[in-house]
Structure formats: C-alpha cells, structure tokens
Image (cartoon, helix red, strand yellow):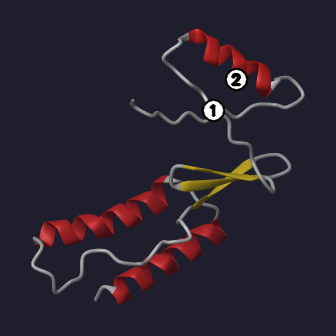
Amino acid sequence: MCKKDILIVYNENRTNIDDLLDCFNKLASKLEFTLERETDLKITFLDITIYREPNSLSVDIYRKPTYRDVIILDDSSHPREHKIAAIQFLYNRMITYRLPPGNMHKEYSTIQQILTSNK
C-alpha cells in the first residue's frame, strides 16, 4: 500500500476537522486517512516543523531526535558529484523553505557544523 502525506491548514472556527476526516474516509474504501493534530502550536510535516503564530505560520527544518550530522565524508571514495550534491541539498532546502531570519541563521550554523564534522 502506498502512503501519501497531505497537509491541510484550516480555520477551526469554520471547519470541523473530524467531519472532514470522516468525509475523506468515505470517498474510497481503499484509502484510509488519519489525523495528526498540532501540539504546542506546532506540527511536523515531512522535513519541516510548522509553527502557528498569531496571524501567520512560520517554518523550521525538522530533524528527528535520532538525527546525526553525517553526510558523505570528504575522504570517502564516493564520486565528488555525490558529495557536492549532498551539500547543495542542505543549502537549497534552507533557501527554498523561506525560513524566518532566526531559523535561517540557525540552519546555516547547522550546515556549517555538518560540513565541519564531515571534513
């Protein structure tokens, strides 16, 4: 069975999410939708954490508690293109997600630490 992730942002005053979930689950018997609610005004979705602010949403890069800052070591025998691609992925993600300035600075520091750890 193929699992897909869907994020729905909704207004609690206008949408009953339990009714919506029930409606989705009745659409097709082979599909099963589940619900994960935000905790402490935040929710993790794929590789980001979304924070609910008073009038907006903000995001940060999410790393699992078991995360280790290991990418392809510089002295490994992997092709140079693979090493560069791993680094480019980190920077591209940081820029693409339009992180708030504080989160951008934190992510940049994290990337620098990853690069240092991996020589």
Position of 31 with respect to 78 (left or right) is right
The total of numbered circles placed on residues is 2
In the rendering, at what x and y percent does residue 60 appear?
Answer: 60, 61
> Which residue occupies the foreground of this view, 18 or 109?
18
Residue drawn where x is 60% and y is 36% of the image = 7
> Which residue occupies the foreground of this view, 11 or 46?
46
Mark 2 in CB contact with mark 1 (< 8 angstroms): yes
In the rendering, at what x and y percent does residue 30 appear?
Answer: 48, 17
Label 1, secondary structure: give it. loop
Residue drawn where x is 13% and y is 73% of the image = 80
Report the amino acid beneath label 2: Leu
Report the amino acid beneath label 1: Thr
Q: For the N terminus, which image quadrant?
A: top left
Position of 51 with respect to 54 (left or right) is left
Tell me if mark 1 has few (under 14), some (14-19) or many (20+) residues whose alpha carbon lies within 10 angstroms of its own.
few
How far is disc 2 from disc 1 in space, using C-alphas? 7 Å
> Which residue occupies the foreground of this view, 24 or 101?
24
Q: State the residue position of label 2.
A: 21
Residue drawn where x is 74% and y is 43% of the image = 37
For residue 34, the mark is 1
- Is 92 above or below relative to 4? below
> Which residue occupies the foreground of this view, 63 or 25?
25
Tell me if mark 2 has few (under 14), some (14-19) or many (20+) residues whose alpha carbon lies within 10 angstroms of its own.
some
For residue 112, the mark is none
- Is 72 above or below relative to 82? below
- Is 53 above or below relative to 11? below
